[in-house]
Amino acid sequence: MTRYIFITGGVVSSLGKGLASAALGALLQARGFTVRLRKLDPYLNVDPGTMSPFEHGEVFVTDDGAETDLDLGHYERFTGVSARRTDSVSSGRIYSTVLEKERRGDYLGKTIQVIPHVTNEIKDFINIGDGEVDFCLCEIGGTVGDIEGLPFFEAIRQFSQDKPRGQCIFMHLTLLPYLAASGELKTKPTQHSVKELRAIGIAPDVLVCRSEHPIPDREREKIGLFCNVRKEAVIAAYDLKSIYEAPLAYHREGLDQAVLDAFGISPAPRPNLSRWDDVMDRLTHAEGEVRVGIVGKYTQLEDAYKSIVEALTHGGMAHRVRVRAEWIDAEIFGREDASPMLEGLHAILVPGGFGERGTEGMIKAAQYAREHQIPYLGICLGMQMAVIEAARNLASLPDAGSEEFDHESSGERRFTPVVYHLKQWVQGNHTVARKVGDNKGGTMRLGAYTAKLTPGSKVSDIYNATSIEERHRHRYEVDMTYRDALEDHGMIFSGLSPDAKLPEIIEVKDHPWFIGVQFHPELKSKPFAPHPLFADFVRAAKDVSRLV
Ligand code: GLN
């Protein structure tokens, strides 16, 4: 039997619902339960794939090729459970399914309404995989009271009625603001938020209260009384130095106990928190610091590179060193010589991105790393830029570039495309084909693909394997036609697709650490299982930091 935990938020946004959900998932696992986490987003985009990283942060890609909310990244990092396409849904997706069904005539001429047609679609979604795990945690995006959130709240209310009694609980996150003038924590916004929730028929079983100050017992009692929640189920959530403290901190405050009590699971299995003790030990007992420059386009919003920052932290944990990410706007190279900004860095990372803006800066960063023997990790666009750099400066192709920067439809050609728009490829045992005019969301190579690594190459040593699976999200590919010319100059194609048609990894010979990958290794890194590429990249940076 699967039990359901619905997580909602009130008072203000950005309270850390995703993190609380992920930490609760980890705590339930620590007590021996199996979990799955889901995100239900009220916005109208069909998925976040077409949203700007400036708006919405990173797009998290699953093994099965869905472009999802970055909260799914938290879920995976805390639980190690690989998310699936069916773990993320938006109003846009729900409505488009309902409208498709209506056009197909599936509703047999009925009037289509939010209740029951939209709410049924949401309930069906939540119920996917029922029975597979002990707990399914469903986080509802946004804040109670948002207009577009209403169908989701109504659907989870109905869902809890449809299931036998005691199989669903509601957890609500709120904020206790502190008034410095009177030196008090105020509970009124929480009371109002719960009132709003109860008005739509949902009575929370557990309240998680974000607070910058300790919550005195009498305030806890008051919240319990006014919100009709047991005092022990009013859980404090204080600010944390690191997100990875969350499981232990929530456990100390009694979150997992309160949740199991709400389900009447007694006696509760004892938790084994050794995984999180070890994570905290590595985080708090780091020696020294390495400086990693991230040369990208979306550097104003760190959330745009969420998984990369986390994967670097995990790499640091593997080698007990702190990683300081230094953000360098790639566009700056267009205005001035930015190499002074790269001096003194222990490693350079060029992350993924779309469009031409900033790419000349990324190319210069790759050149700097190659020529100065600085460890370089190029991810997706970062690999493509390293190849363009080598083509221009080593293989005598001064106008090398990517088809992404020339407008295919206009026929304009400024570059020799060493990176081209791939329109047909093999996935597993079938061929996928795309046209230029296809829907924006559907034209990419998305999700997990296998890569074969050359035995004896640096990457096969790092992975300790000759076959790997990593997640992709891109339209363009490095052109194999240039392989020989580049390999003659020391840029080796050390990872290829199984049919040997697509380059997956390049590395530079005679360099301490220069690797470009067409996929996104950051998506699979965990604090308790750092990704080998990130771990070894940080190790290389640590070696450089010891030299200077
Ligand atoms: N824009 C490039 C492409 O589509 C790289 C994408 C990425 O970095 N994720 O191939």
Image (tube, rainbow, N blue to C red):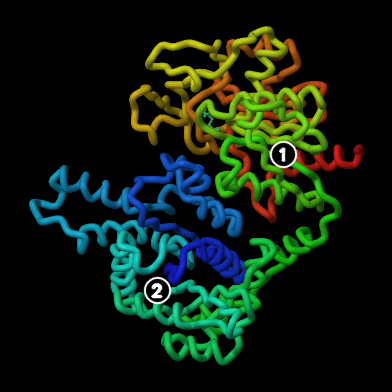
Q: Who's the residue at 34% across and 24% down the image?
A: 437
Which residue is label 1 attached to? 293
In this rendering, does residue 344 appear at all? yes
Depicted 515 relative to depicted 241: above or below = above
Kindly state the secondary structure of the residue where label 2 is placed.
strand
The 10 Å Cα crowd at callout 2, few under 14, some 14 to 19, many 20 or more, is: many
> Residue 302 in the image: x percent, y percent?
60, 48
The 10 Å Cα crowd at callout 1, few under 14, some 14 to 19, many 20 or more, is: many
Amino acid identity at mark 1: Gly
> Residue 62 in the image: x percent, y percent?
50, 45
Q: Quadrant of the N terminus?
A: bottom left
Whichever of labels 2 and 1 marks the residue nearer the N terminus, that label is: 2
Amino acid identity at mark 2: Cys
Q: Who's the residue at 61% across and 74% down the image?
A: 212
Depicted 100 relative to depicted 152: above or below = above
In this rendering, does residue 452 appear at all? no
Which residue is label 2 attached to? 168
Quarter of the view holding residue 350: top right
Kindly state the secondary structure of the residue where label 1 is placed.
strand
Q: So how many labels did they put on this image?
A: 2
